[in-house]
Image (cartoon, grey):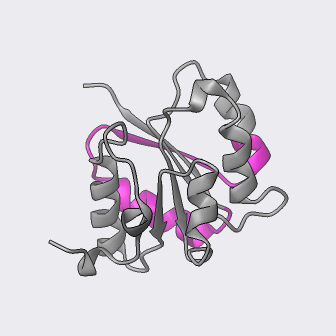
Amino acid sequence: MEKYRVFYLDDDRDDIELFLAATENFNNVQVIVFTDSNSMIKNLHLVKKIPNALFVDINMPTISGYDVIKEIRVYDRYSEMPIVILSAMGYGDLDRFRSIGANYFVVKPVTLDKLRRTLRLVFDMDFKAFVAKKDDFVLRDIDTMAS
């Protein structure tokens, strides 16, 4: 089985460690971490195989996650690559993020268990079939999802 490759853009070391810990026991998931927006964009253009998903924090130095998404969505090559915002802030302006091409917004869970379950849910999503409407674009807390 081919690896599920994820690019993860975040500049907070604690959040990076939590993300890596949450995914370490997932079979066939490879996470490539970037702490700088320019580096992530450059590497995205260099890879032959587009990642299965891109996770972006909104609050980044130099180039914000918002601007990263806008820049990436200009290229047809990345039109089907799911972009998931993983951020503790910014969910007050969800329409803005949907309009630039983000596929999903996840409010950063603060515990390892919640992040692990949230990431499992997102990794299992079929983004080709999932078109987020206003009400289901954001996941605030996995424990309060409608069943």
Quadrant of res 98: bottom right
Question: Which range is magenta?
Answer: 11-40
Residue 27 forms part of the magenta stretch: yes
Rendering coords of residue 24 (x, y %): 35, 53
Quadrant that contains the N terminus: top left
Q: Nearer the viewer, residue 23 or 82?
A: 82
Q: Residue at x 43, y 80 (%)?
A: 110
Q: Relative to 42, say whether 91 is above or below.
A: below
Q: Relative to 141, say whether 15 is above or below.
A: above
Rendering coords of residue 93 (x, y %): 62, 72
Q: Nearer the viewer, residue 113 or 130?
A: 130
Residue 57 visible? The answer is no
Quadrant that contains the C terminus: bottom left
Rendering coords of residue 60 (x, y %): 74, 63
33 horizontally vs 65: left or right? left
Q: Residue at x 44, y 65 (%)?
A: 134
Quadrant of res 52: top left
Q: Nearer the viewer, residue 143 or 80?
A: 80
Q: Residue at x 32, y 64 (%)?
A: 118
Q: Residue furthest right?
A: 62
